[in-house]
Amino acid sequence: MNKWRSPGTTRRHDHDPARRRLLEQALALAGTAAVAALAGLPPSARGEESAAPVSDPHPALDRRLSRIAFGCCAEQDRPQPVWGPVLARRNDLFIFLGDNIYADTRDMTVMRAKYAKLAAQPGFRRLRETTPLVAMWDDHDFGENDAGGAYPMKEESRQIFLDFWAEPAGSPRRERDGVYASYVFGPPGARVQVLLPDLRFNRTAMTPMALQGAEYQAWGRGQVAAGRPLPGPYQRNPDRAATMLGERQWAWLERQFEVPAELRLFGSSVQVLADFTGWEAWANFARDQDRLFDVIRRKRANGVLFLSGDMHYAELSKLDVNVPYPLWDLTSSGLTEEWRVATPNANRASEIVPDANFGWIDIDWRGEATTLAFGITDATGRERLRWTLPLAELAVRA
């Protein structure tokens, strides 16, 4: 269990922001007009069906975030020295972006045992004691390499994931078709929304590259039919109905972009802007990728910064064509896993970091113009990438 707790004392009237936030969370959980009336709030303030959805519950929502770190790809049986420099930063929040263990199984006893190994890692244990956490899964902690909606144990895996990450018993996240979540931290003027879409639970099967030949294609179809993973390389899925999120999650995500926030950290378990790697990425589902950019434009959702993982190396990607404003994707991977050969990426805006690493975002709320610094630090504590950006640049063009 996380040892973090929200403030324990609030004034007994609805003008107190902390009390109002607790009431809004209660509405999200209860979802009834009667509770809304008792709270002195309109029925439209209820839950995720509301026109103005509220944050998912978290004990640190009132915290003003200035130092955030994130990472993924932590093999539970390997040493994890990366937690040393992570802890030295004294972060206000740590975001796990998936492959938090390498379960790779349909045996839920094996999966639980691997989570127990992560919990026993000294650095992780200290992180959990000192730092608020949020988490999303990717394929290996979902269940199998490159797995999607056909993975037969996805509901059992979902329950294990939510239990391990201490999701409250009444949380709306426990009722969703997947483990997607959205949190809003901090006061007005310094609100940070953390969006965590689930790119596994409802995902359409991947499409292997035709260049592999007919024999590979036939083998791949058999793998998919049997519910087994297909190791790639992949091409863009030509089916316009193909999706990573599913329609129910898409409806939820569109509502989240209506939530007031100054900065929106969109935590994706796979790369959002990389084009074209041949491996798992939003580019494989071009319709979903275009839809994401269109939603940001239509909702006039300023302040979006993409965070991603999966690749076993770190890099920065940028896209400034046919998008609502310049978009950045900071990829950090992995906390233990490394890969020396980078895949193609037409939107790469930095060198790669092939060593174990974590990503970070520092927010300077002081003064009239908020500034972001973000980058990559390796497991030795050496800063490898850094970029500085005025938050005002992440604004929908007129």
Image (cartoon, rainbow, N blue to C red):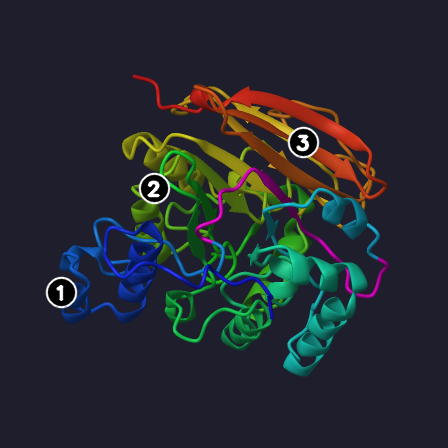
Q: Compute the Cα span from label 1 to label 3.
A: 46 Å
Observer-nearest residue: 325 or 129? Answer: 129
Label 1 sits on residue: 37
From the image, which quarter does the N terminus lie in? bottom right
52 relative position to 228: left or right? left
Contact check, label 2 and label 1, Cβ < 8 Å: no
Mark 2 vs mark 1, foreground winner is 1
Q: Residue furthest bottom?
A: 109
Q: Compute the Cα span from label 3 to label 2.
A: 25 Å
Contact check, label 3 and label 2, Cβ < 8 Å: no
Q: Residues within 10 Å of mark 1 (few under 14, many from 20)?
A: few
Observer-nearest residue: 30 or 244? Answer: 30
Mark 1 vs mark 3, foreground winner is 1
Q: Amino acid at mark 2?
A: Phe
Q: Quadrant of residue 324?
A: top left
First reached walking from the N terminus: tag 1 or tag 3: 1
Where is residue 259? Give x, y as percent. Answer: 32, 43
The part of the chain drawn in magenta is: 61-79
Where 391 falls versus 377 (above or below)?
A: above
Q: Compute the Cα span from label 2 to label 1.
A: 26 Å
Q: What's the residue at 82%, 40% (across, down)?
A: 355
Where is residue 81? Give x, y as percent. Answer: 84, 52
Secondary structure, magenta segment, majority class: loop
